[in-house]
Amino acid sequence: MSPIEAAAALDDDQTRRPGDYATGRHDLRQLIQLRWIAVLGQVVTIFLAIVVFQLPLPLKSMIVVLAALVGFNLFSRLRLHLRIPVSQAELFLALLLDVLALTAQLYLSGGPTNPFIFLFLLQVTLAAVLLRPLPSWIIVVLSTVAFIGLGLTSQDFALPLELGRGLSSPFILGMLVCFVLNAILIVIFISRITRNVRSRDARLADMRQRASEEEHIVHMGLLASGAAHELGTPLATLDVILGDWSHAPPFRDDPELAQDVREMQAQVRRCKAIVSGILMSAGEARGEAPTETSVHAFLDELVAQWRVSRQSAHLDYENRFGEDARIISDLALKQMICNVLDNALEASPRGQRLVVTREAGSLVLAVTDMGPGFDPAILQDLGKPYQSTKGRPGGGLGLFLSLKVARTLSGSLVARNLSFGGASVTIRLPLSALAPGEAGHDE
């Protein structure tokens, strides 16, 4: 297989992953920087060899090779401006050209007697880090063939070894410089390339986590939609029966029984509203569409409704948002905030606190409670579904769904334990994502 065929095979075999695209561009940028250092090093080395050591190097031919390297590097620099991913084939061909350029310069300056012949090891190291196994081994084979070819080819110029002179020998001194150069470049560039790979892996891990979350949401949506359909009929039946009871003499004449019936009717209506909300979220019924409102009106109404439906709550509400701003309100945004408030109520029935502020163009909602705080394992795995210490099936979905909605709105949700006891959940939402006319709800 020729090098060009190998490069073409790389593109056919390459797995297209979004995380690889940015990494490939970073890797090509590292090779460009390394090539500039190589050009500068060759200029300095040629100058010292001719002026200091007075070696009869073929200057014109070596300048042609340098000019070719400079031209290729300028082309590579322009290529980085294209909004297309850098493939493995491109990296392979770039390293292949570097090997050929190094071989040409060594052929013109002593062949195997040139101590800089060990720079082949740098090319092999870069190939091992940047490329897949097959192209890496191709670079190894080509570098070995180039070394053998330099040893077999007749040379018009051979560097005098003079090994007995120690560091006064141009060969020994060149080996020292080559060793130091190899060591420094390997540490610098391998560290950078490894950092790029780690960054790519982190992006891929985040994408996998988000994909897993989306899968959980799809499953929960299907289950919730099915349950909502099944619950609709019995709830409607209960509402009718309770309505009849409220007009029946035994219940109408007994104030205590009448109060119980009214309470049951209120709870049934709340259940029906929850079921309707589930169906609306699933797109199966037209209900509350996104509406334009303001921050103050939205939060004041939400808190009032939440207090009425959770009569046991003791919520301390403080709005420090300042100048009002227009936003779009929908069911998901309301449910996200209610989920956090419900968690605070369960953890601390005797008191909850909601403080609203405005920071750097973002709406910030801080919900605190006086409960026992979050378990460390919950904080460590915040955002994963079914992470709960409540000991009931399906627990731990409130914060998971709230975090997902916050991310959909380009915001964040952070939970922490307070030093004086209790816990705090802070929701931060960019106002630009909530503003009318913005596609803030699209992920």
Image: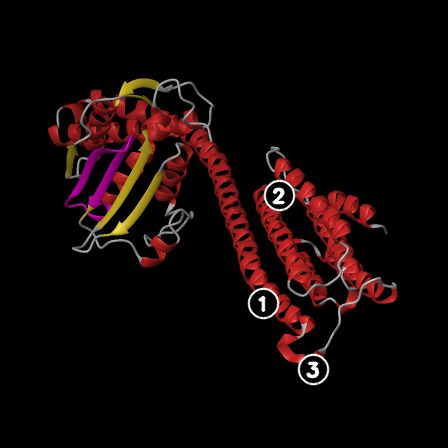
Instruction: Give the mark nearer the N terminus: 3 vs 1.
Output: 3
According to the image, label 2 marks what residue? 17
Compare residues 270 and 103 and report the one nearer the observer.
103
* The quarter of the displayed image where residue 302 is located: top left
Instruction: Give the residues drawn in magenta, as a range.
Output: 345-368
> Which three-letter amino acid code belongs to the residue tagged 3?
Gly
> Which three-letter amino acid code belongs to the residue tagged 1?
Val
* The quarter of the displayed image where residue 366 is located: top left
Task: Tell whether 374 sits left or right of 69.
Answer: left
**Which of the two discs, 2 and 1, sits closer to the camera?**
1
* The quarter of the displayed image where residue 58 is located: bottom right
Residue beneath the point at 67% across and 44% down? 70
Instruction: Give the mark nearer the N terminus: 2 vs 1.
Output: 2
Characterize the local packing of mark 1: few (<14), some (14-19) or many (20 or more) Cα atoms within 10 angstroms: few
> Which three-letter amino acid code belongs to the residue tagged 2?
Arg
| Residue 432, horizontal then vertical, whole percent | 35, 26
Marks 2 and 3 sit apart, C-alpha to C-alpha, by 55 Å
| Residue 253, horizontal then vertical, whole percent | 13, 24
Does the CB distance between marks 3 and 1 fall below 8 Å?
no
According to the image, label 3 marks what residue? 164
According to the image, label 1 marks what residue? 180
| Element at label 3 | helix
Residue beneath the point at 67% across and 70% down? 170
Marks 2 and 1 sit apart, C-alpha to C-alpha, by 37 Å
| Residue 39, horizontal then vertical, whole percent | 64, 51
